[in-house]
Amino acid sequence: MIFVSIYRLLPDYHQNNKNNSFLLILIILCFIYIIFDISKSFIPFKKSKGTICIVIDDFGFSNDDIVKQFFHINPNLTVAIIPNTTFSRAIGKYADSVGIETIIHMPMESHEAIQKEYPLSLNQKLNSKLVEERIKIAFNNLPNALGMNNHQGSKATENLQLMKNIARTLKKLDKFFLDSFTNPESRAFITMRRFGVPTQLRQIFLDHKEDKNNIKQNLDSLRVLSHSMDIAIGIGHVKPTTLEVLMEEIPKLESEGYKFIKLSQAVK
C-alpha cells in the first residue's frame, strides 16, 4: 500500500519517466525503513530487573581520597552533605563539577541522650520562622542541592508541627524531601505528601555495621526489594568499606539488568 501511495503522490509520473530514478531511490529507502520498523517488534525489549536508588550520607567533615572516590562510583548516586560544616561548600562544588546530585543532610533532634552538636540543626522547639531561616541558610551553603533528608531525627520526625514547618519551607523553595526513616513513628513522609512536597521513604540502611559481608547482604536485600517496588531506596555512609562494596557490586548489578537512578528521579 505504501508503494502505491508514493506512486500516486509523485506528480506527472506517468507522463515523465525522468522521475523513475528518484522514485526507485525513494521506494528503496521506504522499504528499508519498513523492514527496520517490523524487525523492532521481534527484538525482545530489555526490561530492567529492578530500579535502585542509593544515597550516601554524612559528607562535610572531611575531604580526603575516600570522599572523592564516592563521586566516581556511579553517576546516578546522590550525596547528602551536612550543611555549614568544614568542607560542605567545597564538597558541594566538587559534586557539581563532576555532575553528581547533592541534597542537604539536615541534622535533626534525636531521642539519643547524648547528641553531637552541629553547626545547623532542627528541633521541635523552633518556631516556623526559625525553621525556615535555618533551612534557607543550609541551601545558601549548598545552593545546588535539590532537596533534603534528615540526619538522625528520631525525635524531630515524629513531631507533626515541626514536619509541617519543614514541609511549608521546602514547598516554598521547590525542594524535595527523603525521609531517612530513623523512627517508625516518623510523620515526615506523609506530611510532605500532604503539603505537595515530592518525597520518598528509605527502605534499607546499607552499613550500620562496617562489615563487608553485612553491607553486601543489605545491598542484596535492596536488590530483592526492587523486584516488588517501583524503586528501592538505600542509604549508605562515607565509609571505606561501603565504598569498596559499592565499587564492586554496582557494576555487577548493572550488568545483570538493574537500573540505578538519582533521588530526584525517585521522589514524587
Image: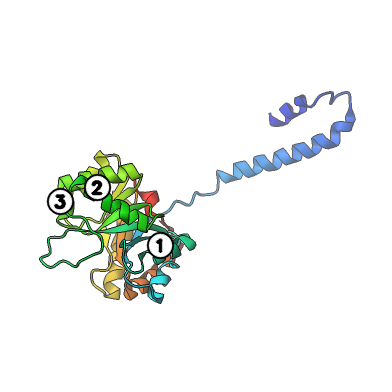
The structure residue drawn at horizontal position 12% and vertical position 60%, both measured from the top left corner, is 111
The structure residue drawn at horizontal position 75% and vertical position 40%, both measured from the top left corner, is 28
The structure residue drawn at horizontal position 27% and vertical position 50%, both measured from the top left corner, is 133
The earlier-in-sequence mark between 1 and 3 is 1
Query: Residue at label 1?
Result: 92
58 with respect to 125 (left or right):
right
Label drawn at residue 158 = 3
Query: Which class describes the residues within 10 Å of circle 3: few (<14), some (14-19), or many (20+)?
Result: some
Are the residues flagged by discs 1 and 2 in contact, CB closer than 8 Å? no
Query: Which class describes the residues within 10 Å of circle 1: few (<14), some (14-19), or many (20+)?
Result: many
Label drawn at residue 166 = 2
Element type at mark 2: helix
The earlier-in-sequence mark between 3 and 2 is 3
Q: Position of residue 153 (x, y in %)?
A: 19, 57
The earlier-in-sequence mark between 1 and 2 is 1
Disc 3 from disc 2: Cα separation: 13 Å
User: Which of the pair 65/48 is nearer the observer?
Assistant: 65
User: Which of the pair 65/2 is nearer the observer?
Assistant: 65
Are the residues flagged by discs 1 and 3 in contact, CB closer than 8 Å? no
Q: Position of residue 103 (x, y in %)?
A: 35, 56
User: Which of the pair 82/20 is nearer the observer?
Assistant: 82
Say above or below: 235 vs 147: below
Quadrant in the picture for residue 260 = bottom left
Element type at mark 1: helix
Disc 1 from disc 2: Cα separation: 22 Å
Q: Position of residue 205 (x, y in %)?
A: 26, 63
User: Which of the pair 81/85 is nearer the observer?
Assistant: 85
Q: Position of residue 60 (x, y in %)?
A: 33, 67
Query: Which class describes the residues within 10 Å of circle 2: few (<14), some (14-19), or many (20+)?
Result: many
Quadrant for the N terminus, please.
top right
Quadrant for the C terminus, please.
top left
